[in-house]
Image (cartoon, grey):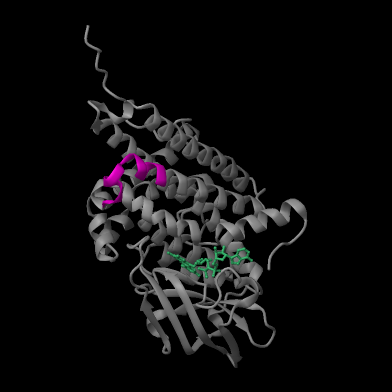
Amino acid sequence: MPAQSIKPPAPNVDFYDLAGTLTPGELALVEQVRAFMRTKVAPIIDEYWIEDAFPFELLPAFKELNLGGLGLEGYGCRGGSAKLYGFVAMEMARVDPSFCTFFGVHDGLAMGSIYFDGSDEQKRTWLPPMARLEKIGCFGLTEPEVGSGAAGGLMTTARREGDAWILNGRKTWIGNAPWCDISIIWARDVADSQVKGFIVENKLTPGLSVEKIEHKISLRVVQNGLITLDNCLVPEANRLLSANSFKDAARVLRKTRFAVGWMATGCQMGAYEHAVAYALERHQFGKSIAAFQLVQDLIAKMLGNVTACQCLLLRLAAMADEGKVQDAHDSLAKSFCTARMRETVAWAREILGGNGIVLDYEVARFFADAEALYSYEGTLQMQNLIVGKAVTGHSAFV
Ligand SMILES: Cc1cc2nc3c(=O)[nH]c(=O)nc-3n(C[C@H](O)[C@H](O)[C@H](O)COP(=O)(O)OP(=O)(O)OC[C@H]3O[C@@H](n4cnc5c(N)ncnc54)[C@H](O)[C@@H]3O)c2cc1C
């Protein structure tokens, strides 16, 4: 009797039913985001990736999702739990880590800086138009000479002159910078050597210029810029009033590292889904490659990585919503999930053989984009040093 052919199940990237923990309202929003990503983003994103360009054509439909200020309360923000923020980020990155990064920089880093470090008046002024995505923001911390060592080494300076500040320096890798409206610039006050944050209006500040960073091999859709600040005059009213040291910038980064954990998980999910679908379709030696033991081993290892990250993040989100999270918790999530992501996307690429390096077969974009997620918002080494300090009590920085 011939072997019975069975219809293979669709790849299930929610193997432990995490979606079952969402409320009906949360699930509805996640499904809306999924529909947007699948119907609007997925069909066009490869072309933008090739062109190294941002898909401005998506912004009107994206605005309709009303996601601005997700995870932040009041001031016209969408609000919602840490868990909801995580699920939305994961869902976006599952289709396109670049588009998710654009949103993360605006919502998490730029709006987050004003939300956590701004005065009530500053929040009332800046957050509503940013929540409506009328004004888009970026976050300028990294400098050409200072990346991982930003805590003690920022070279951009801020000098008080009457009711204003004069900023001088350079910021590199800044996502959204080539086209956005507002930059959060972190600079060292020459008077007390402390790091302070400033809201700088890109298009209205003489002396501010941005050069696009070209030739990236990762997250090509996100536009990164090198910002030069040449005697930029910023009113005292635009200094983030609760940002008095690097710790206040780090408070923003803690939240966004949590988000990068979710994005790294979404990136793996996208690569996994496409790899399993490909394995089911591709035939060698007269049968589907999905029927080979060694291919199933890769599939099981990928699913194990995805599921481990999802479960870790779900628990971390619950701790965040209970106010129990410390720096090291977020750092461990960022380093663990991005390291697992790097393995997963490489295994997905492997399953596609030669087609794994061609953009047309979907997995290559996740493979390439994973590299930036792995390094930004603090490298694996920096996160593990934070974890190591919390565990041992010894700071091994430097
Ligand atoms: C696509 C992309 C987008 C980004 N977006 C932004 C943004 O919007 N805003 C922003 O401010 N920044 C942004 N960044 C910058 C990012 O946060 C930095 O690239 C990152 O923090 C690492 O800094 P670096 O690249 O200067 O590497 P370096 O600090 O030079 O590190 C190089 C290597 O040395 C290792 N290393 C350094 N110090 C130590 C140590 N003490 N012990 C052990 N190992 C060490 C690092 O782990 C790394 O492997 C972005 C980066 C990328 C690639």
- Which sits in the foreground, 126 or 280? 280
In the rendered image, residue 296 lying in the magenta stretch gets the answer no
The secondary structure making up most of the magenta span is helix
In the rendered image, residue 348 lying in the magenta stretch gets the answer yes
Q: Name which residue lies at 45% across and 35% down.
A: 303
Q: Residue furthest top?
A: 1
- In the image, is 273 to the left or to the right of 309? left
Q: Name which residue lies at 34% across and 72% down.
A: 214
Residue 299 visible at all: yes
Q: Looking at the figure, which quarter contains the C terminus?
A: bottom right
Q: Name which residue lies at 27% across and 28% down.
A: 288
Q: Residue furthest right?
A: 393
- In the image, is 236 to the left or to the right of 33? right
Residue 69 visible at all: no
Q: How many marks?
A: 0
Q: Looking at the figure, which quarter contains the N terminus?
A: top left
Q: Name which residue lies at 25% across and 61% down.
A: 50
Q: Position of residue 218 (x, y in %)?
A: 37, 60
| Magenta region, residue range | 346-358
